């Protein structure tokens, strides 16, 4: 490859516009997890906690796919009381997009009921 001043350079993984596909356009999200699964000088990948992923799915709630993902994530969380799980999930609520507290609570309740029944 040749850059804008005519100097040759190589890219290990091809042109930069081919590195990511559209399905990872969310790359700007940052996990609060400290569990590093890959570390490179230009890229660090962290494993998000189940509570964090559930918080994002409850916030997004774009349809059955998000609901099914949220159900899966809740099933991965060790059984605690509904209040304890909600408190931990709430700590990971994203600031953007923002939804009202009541809407977040009602979505969590729906997911909880689908996994554990009414409580």
Image (cartoon, helix red, strand yellow):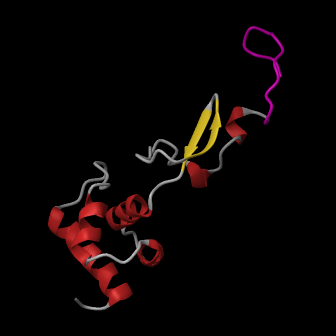
Position of residue 91 in the picture relative to residue 52 (left or right):
left
The answer to whether residue 10 is magenta is: yes
Position of residue 26 in the picture relative to residue 20 (left or right):
left
Total marks placed: 0
Residue 81 x, y percent position in the rendering: 26, 77
Q: Quadrant of residue 41?
A: top right
Residue 34 x, y percent position in the rendering: 47, 44
Single out the residue that lies furthest toward the bottom: 117
**Position of the C terminus by quadrant:** bottom left
Residue 4 x, y percent position in the rendering: 72, 13
The answer to whether residue 85 is magenta is: no
Residue 114 x, y percent position in the rendering: 36, 87
The residue closer to the viewer here, 81 or 48, is 81
The residue closer to the viewer here, 46 or 24, is 46
**Residue under the image location 29 percent in, 61 percent down:** 88
Q: Quadrant of residue 50?
A: bottom left
55 lies above or below 32: below
**Residue under the image location 29 percent in, 81 percent down:** 110
Position of residue 39 in the picture relative to residue 91 (left or right):
right
Position of residue 71 in the picture relative to residue 103 (left or right):
right
108 lies above or below 25: below
Dominant secondary structure of the magenta stretch? Answer: loop
**Position of the N terminus by quadrant:** top right
88 lies above or below 39: below
**Residue under the image location 32 percent in, 55 percent down:** 92
**Residue under the image location 42 percent in, 71 percent down:** 77
Tell me the magenta residue range: 1-13
59 lies above or below 14: below
């Amino acid at each position: 490859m040749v850059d804008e001043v005519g100097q040759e350079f190589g890219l290990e993984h091809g042109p930069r516009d081919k590195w990511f596909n559209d399905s990872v356009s969310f790359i700007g999200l940052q996990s609060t997890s400290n569990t590093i699964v890959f570390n490179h000088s230009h890229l660090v990948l962290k494993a998000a906690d189940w509570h964090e992923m559930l918080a994002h799915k409850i916030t997004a709630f774009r349809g059955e796919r998000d609901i099914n993902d949220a159900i899966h994530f809740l099933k991965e969380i060790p059984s605690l009381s509904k209040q304890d799980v909600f408190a931990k999930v709430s700590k990971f609520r994203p600031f953007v997009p923002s939804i009202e507290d009541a809407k977040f609570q009602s979505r969590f309740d729906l997911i909880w009921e689908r996994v554990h029944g009414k409580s």
